[in-house]
Image (cartoon, helix red, strand yellow):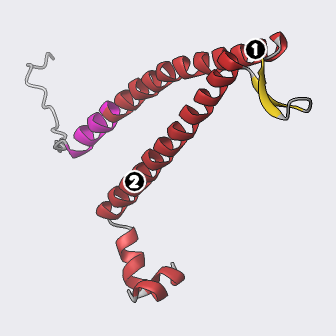
Amino acid sequence: MPQVSLVTGIPLITLKQWKTKDWWKDFALQLKTEDVQQLDSNLRRVVDKALKTVEDRIDLGDAQFDQKTGKIVRIPIKAHVALKITTELLTKKEKLEANPIKEQVEKTIDERLSKLSEEFARFASSKVIDVIPVEKHDTTPQQA
């Protein structure tokens, strides 16, 4: 934070006070979410390019220089390479499909915790009834 204070010109004490506020936490979460979305977009673009390259190699083969002709020729990929590509892609696909289930379970847990939090807050803010003990007098006639 001292570095942020120097760069922005905002006093350090002000930054420390802001950091304890709810809006700061919301804004920090928003920034993290935007960073994750940008990274996800970049990764998706790179993965798409890599998959297109793999698809090209599967369809047309690997490029190899032919010394006799002096040209680049395409040689079909080996079976073990095709098997490895298929296995890796299917494994990754299974992981991606399993991930939404995990997210759904986490969402359900978060919802339950949120409801519990609301109930505890409601319970804590409920009115407290002061009970004043009253002595009970015996009104039944006594026998001698």
User: Which residue is labeled 1 in the image?
Assistant: 82
Q: Please tell me which residue is depicted at 52% across the width and 17% down the height of the picture.
A: 97
Q: Amino acid at mark 2?
A: Leu
* Mark nearer the N terminus (1 vs 2): 2
**Quarter of the image where one finds residue 81:** top right
**For numbered disc 1, what is the local secondary structure?**
helix
Above or below: residue 144 compared with residue 69? above
Q: How many marks?
A: 2
**Which residue sits furthest front?**
69
Above or below: residue 35 compared with residue 122? below
Q: Please tell me which residue is depicted at 45% across the width and 49% down the height of the picture.
A: 38
Q: Where does residue 22 sit, x and y in percent of width and height?
A: 31, 60
User: Which residue is labeled 2 in the image?
Assistant: 29
**Quarter of the image where one finds residue 12:** bottom left
Magenta stretch: includes residue 2: no
In the displayed structure image, the side of residue 137 where residue 81 appears, left or right: right
Q: Which mark is residue 11?
A: none
Q: Where does residue 107 sit, x and y in percent of width and height?
A: 40, 28
Q: Where does residue 74 sit, x and y in percent of width and height?
A: 76, 23
Q: For the residue carrying disc 1, how many other residues have a C-alpha within 10 Å: few (<14), some (14-19), or many (20+)?
A: some
In depth, the one of 137 and 115 nearer the eye is 115
Above or below: residue 21 compared with residue 57? below
Q: CA distance from mark 1 to mark 2?
A: 42 Å
**For numbered disc 2, what is the local secondary structure?**
helix
Q: Where does residue 35 sit, x and y in percent of width and height?
A: 45, 53
In depth, the one of 56 and 83 nearer the eye is 56
Q: Please tell me which residue is depicted at 41% across the width and 84% down the height of the picture.
A: 8
Secondary structure mostly seen in the magenta stretch: helix
Task: Say which of marks 1 and 2 sits in front.
Answer: 1
Magenta stretch: includes residue 119: yes
